[in-house]
Image (cartoon, rainbow, N blue to C red):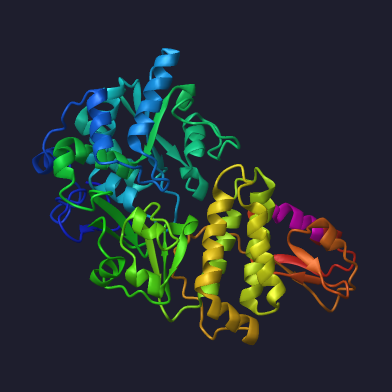
Amino acid sequence: MTTMVDVPHGTALGPSRLTKGLDRFARLNREGHRRIHGRSPYLSFSQLVAIAEAVDLRGRGGAAFPFARKLRAVARSADSRNARTIILVNGTEGEPASFKDKMLLTRTPHLVVDGAMIAATALRAQEVIFGVIEGGPAEQSLKEAIEELDVRGTIRIVRLPEAFVTGEGGALVRGVNGETPIPPGRKVRAAESGVDGLPTLLSNAETYAQLALLARLGPEGYRQLGTEKEPGTVLLTISGSMVVEVPTGVPLAEVLKRCGVGIGQGVLVGGYHGAWLSAEAAAAAPVSREGMKAFGATLGAGIVVPLPTNTCPLGEVSAVATYLGEESAGQCGPCFLGLPAIARSVAELLEGRTGEETLMAVRRGGQRVRGRGACHHPDGTMRFVQSSLEVFADDIEAHLTNGTCGRQVQGVLPLPGRQSQLHLTVDWSRCDGHGVCSLVVPDLLRLDGDGFPVISDTPVPEWLEEDARHAVAMCPALALRLGVKA
C-alpha cells in the first residue's frame, strides 16, 4: 500500500468523477479502478480527436491549450518525418500551492495511466513516460500501477528534482532527455521535437485523467456536468491543503464556504503565476476559465488560496516574490537580474523604509521584464506581484505611511522549506562608505545619498551567494557580513 504522506485527501463538491471511490479507498489498485470506472475503451486517432473537440478538452496544467490541436500537431509532425511518437505525462507539479496531480497519481494512478495509454494507442506511440518528482509518493504509486498492469517496457518513469521551473514543458523534456531540467531558452514545441527529438504529446496528469473519463462517458455523458462552453469538472487545490473536484461554473465563494474557508482579504487564483482577486471579485467569480478571465484572473492549474484577515498581505507577497526570484533558471537578464531586484523592492515596501518611488520601481520593473524572458517565468511572476499592488493597495499605503500594517506574516502562501537564509548585513561601527560593495554586487545593494550601503532584508539568492562572499572579502573596512540573520 502506498504511503499517503503529505498528499491531500481528494473529495468532490457535487458528483464525483476524478475522485470517484476515493471516499472509500486510500488508493485504487487495478481491480478497484476497473470496478469503479470500468474498462478503458479503444479509440482510433480520428475518434479521439472528435471527442476532444466535441467538449473542447483543454490542458489542465495552466495554459489551457486545446488537446485536439496537440493531437493533430503530434500526428502531423510524425507523418511528415515518418517518425514514431512519445506520450509524456507531466506529474512534476513544481508549484508549492498545488497538489492535485500528486493526489491523482498517488491515489488513483490507473485513471491517469488509462488516459495516457488511450492516447498512445491512437497515436501508435513508441513509449509512455511519466515525469515525477523524485522520492515522492506519486513515484511509488506509479511503480505499483505499472507492476499491476504488467506493461514494463512500454511505460517509463523519470525522476526529476523538485523545483518551480521543472514543470515547464521545455524543462520537463530536457530533464527526460538527461539534461538539466530548465527551460530551453528558445521556443521548441514538444509536438515537433520533444523526447529524443521525437514528436511528443505532452500534458499534465489531470488532462490524461480527464481524457480517460471522456473516453468512457462520451461527449454527451461528459457534458452532464459543468457549463455549456466548459463542460466537466475541475480539480482545485484549496490553500495548499485540500484537493476538491467541482463542476465548472459553480461560484468560487460557494466552493470556499463548503471547504470551511472564508474569502478574507482576497483570493489568489492560478497560483504564483496567477493573479489576486479582490474580496468583492472573489464573491462574484465562477470557477471557469471564462469566468475568471472576466475578473482579470486565470484559473490556471486550479490553485486557490484565500488570504485571511489576520496576516500581512504585503509580507505574504514579499515572501513569494523572493522565492520566485530564487527559482530563476538564470538564463536571461529579465529573470536572473530583474526578478530578484523586484523582490527586493517589494521587501523594501514591506519594511516601510521607502516611499512612492519604490512602488513605482516595482511597476517599472514589471514593464522591463514582461515578454522578454527565455520562458514565461518573469511574466507569470509579475502577474502575481502587480495584481497584489492593485488588490492590496490599502495595505501598501499603510506600510508607506506607518512603516507597517500592524499584522504579522502568518505564512499562508505555501512555500517549500528550501530557501536561502543568508543575509548581507553591515557593521556600522566599521563602515566608512567606501562603496566597493555596490560595485561587486549591485544586484544586492545600492548606496544612499551619502554613499553608504542600503541592503534589503530579503535573503541572498543562491546564485548570488558567491558574489556576496566576494563583496564581503573585498570590503576594505571589514564591515560587510554574510550569515544567518538572528
Residue at horizontal 76%, vertical 57%?
A: 469
Compared to residue 48, the image places residue 455 above or below, namely below
In the image, taking residue 213 as reference, residue 319 lies left or right, namely right
Which of the image's four quarters has the C terminus?
bottom right
Residue 28 location, x and y as percent? 18, 45
Q: Quadrant of residue 382?
A: bottom right
Residue in front for this viewpoint, 376 or 363:
363
209 sits left or right of 217 in the view: right
In the rendered structure, the answer to whether residue 305 lies left or right of residue 180 reads left
- Dominant SS type (magenta): helix
The mark total stands at 0
Farthest top residue?
A: 82
Residue 98 seen in the current view:
yes
Where in the figure is residue 126, as x and y percent of width and height? Answer: 35, 20
Q: Residue at x 49, y 29 (%)?
A: 177
Q: Is residue 370 above or below residue 173?
A: below
Residue shown at the point (28%, 49%) measured from the top left: 230
With 124 as the anchor, is 457 left or right in this view? right
Above or below, 413 relative to 374: below
Region of the chain picked out in magenta, as a range:
464-471
Residue 61 vs residue 76, the one in the foreground: 76
Residue pictured at 18% horizontal, 49% vertical: 17
In which image quadrant can residue 122 be found?
top left
Whether residue 344 is visible, yes or no, is no
Is 159 colored magenta in this rendering?
no
Q: Position of residue 343 (x, y in %)?
A: 63, 63
Residues 443 and 5: in front is: 443
Q: Position of residue 281 (x, y in %)?
A: 39, 70
Reply yes or no: does residue 468 show up in magenta: yes
